[in-house]
Structures are given as C-alpha cells and as structure tokens.
Amino acid sequence: SQTIHQWPATLVQPVGSPLSLECTVEGTSNPNLYWYRQAAGRGLQLLFYSVGIGQISSEVPQNLSASRPQDRQFILSSKKLLLSDSGFYLCAWGRRATNEKLFFGSGTQLSVL
Amino acid sequence: DAKTTQPNSMESNEEEPVHLPCNHSTISGTDYIHWYRQLPSQGPEYVIHGLTSNVNNRMASLAIAEDRKSSTLILHRATLRDAAVYYCIAGYNNNDMRFGAGTRLTVKP
C-alpha cells in the first residue's frame, strides 16, 4: 500500500531563518507531488507541483522554493522566512492519470515568530 | 479548472442526512467533480468524485445536476466524526485541484 510521510509535525522558526520541509512517498512510482499551504481558518493554496524529478511548477510567486531530487521525495525550502509564511503545510501525491484522487500527508504546522 | 461556490457553514443533527451543495456553473465538459473533507489538524481526505452520473460509495453519495452546474454531497446518516470542512473541486486531473474555503459542517448530538 502507498503511504506518504511528512515531517516535522510542528515547527517554530524565527523570522529570517531558513526552512526545509521534507515529504516522501512509499509504495508507488512516478507520482505527481504537491505542496499546499493553509492559513488559519482558510482554504488550501497550491504552492508547487511536480510531475517528475527536477520538474517543478510554481503556482504563487513567493520566497519559497521546491525541489524534487528523487522520484518520491519533495522538499519545500526557504532561505529567509517571513512572518507571513506561518501556516499549515501539506504535502500530497497523486497518480498521473485523469481524475485520480490526491492523498495528503499529516501536515506541518509552521509558526514564524 | 472551474470555480466552485459552497456555503461557509452548515449544521446537522446526529443520525440525520446532510446535503452539502456546490455550484460550479463554469464547469467544462471534461472536468470531474471531486469532494474532499478535512478533519481538524489533519490533511484532507478523498470522499467521492463523479463526472455525469450520480455516484455512491461507503462514505457518501454524490448527486450531479443534469446540466452539471451544481452537485450535492449526501451523507446519509451524519455522525459526530463527520464534523469537518468539506471541499468541492471541479477539475480534469489532479493538477487542477484548487481547494476553496469549503463548507464547515457541524454535527450536533
């Protein structure tokens, strides 16, 4: 069966510090991978998605970046965090086909202070 | 991907059916209608999806209007564990998944 791992579960970082969130998927190959962010009480905002190693599409210009160094690994990074980067970050994967469902990780609650 | 419109919140009593509406008037002929739900402090989970015909699974039923401009997620007997935010999404593939604010469902005992 397929599983998605996302860590850490919670993170408190000072403004201006770097960020690295990691997501890995097991039990499948060539998945589409996604990073979403959710501000408190709001919907999910798609940040990045990837259809293959080294292929990243950015949805929203910001100080975040994403990388996919391996087929089932997706990393969200920032060189200098802003207060506005606080939120609930979710990684998800989906099969490369029409109308396939998304599977989400358990999320990382990031607080930038 | 088509824009969807859902009520901000709804309430239901436990053991009663719940009908969650969604409008997607700009849906294209190839867009599927997906429903996800998000429990507190968790990632969303898939509920159901369909294209034209009504769909049933163990979690819920999806009723799609004949013109496909609206749909309704039906929970046949709401339980306290069904309290969540429900998202309706219209899209062709999983790169089209744009989650709006959803409907916050409260289930009263």
Image (spheres, rainbow, N blue to C red):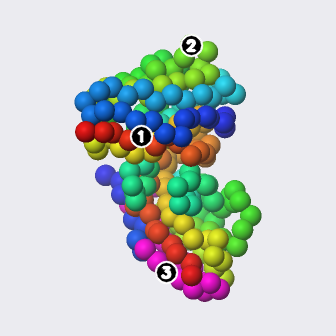
Q: Residue at x 39, y 65 (%)?
A: A5
Q: Is residue A18 above or below residue B79?
A: below
Pointer 3: what residue? Answer: A12
> Where are the magenta residues, as a range?
A10-29
Q: Chain of mark 3?
A: A
Looking at the picture, do discs 1 and 2 lie on one chain? yes
Picture quadrant where residue A24 is located = bottom left
Identify the residue under disc 1.
B105
Q: Nearer the viewer, residue B69 or B79?
A: B79
Closer to the camera: disc 1 or disc 2?
1
Q: Are marks 1 and 3 on the same chain?
A: no
Q: Position of residue B55 (x, y in %)?
A: 41, 23
Check residue B26 in the rendering and tell me which mark sits there, or answer none.
none
Work out whether A93 lies above or below A63: above
Return the chain for callout 2: B
The C terminus of chain A lies in quadrant: bottom right
Give the alpha-carbon distance from disc 1 to disc 2, as whole Å.
26 Å
Q: Relative to the observer, which residue lies in front, B62 or A104?
A: B62
Q: Which residue is mark 2?
A: B66
Q: Are marks 2 and 3 on the same chain?
A: no
Q: Earlier in the sequence, mark 1 or mark 2?
A: 2
Q: Was residue A19 drawn as part of the magenta stretch in this picture?
A: yes
Q: Name the residue at 52% across, 75% down.
A: A111
State the CA–CA distance, disc 2 to disc 3. Answer: 49 Å
Q: Amino acid at mark 1?
A: Leu
Estimate how packed mark 3 is, as few (under 14), some (14 to 19) or many (20 or more) residues with alpha carbons within 10 Å: few
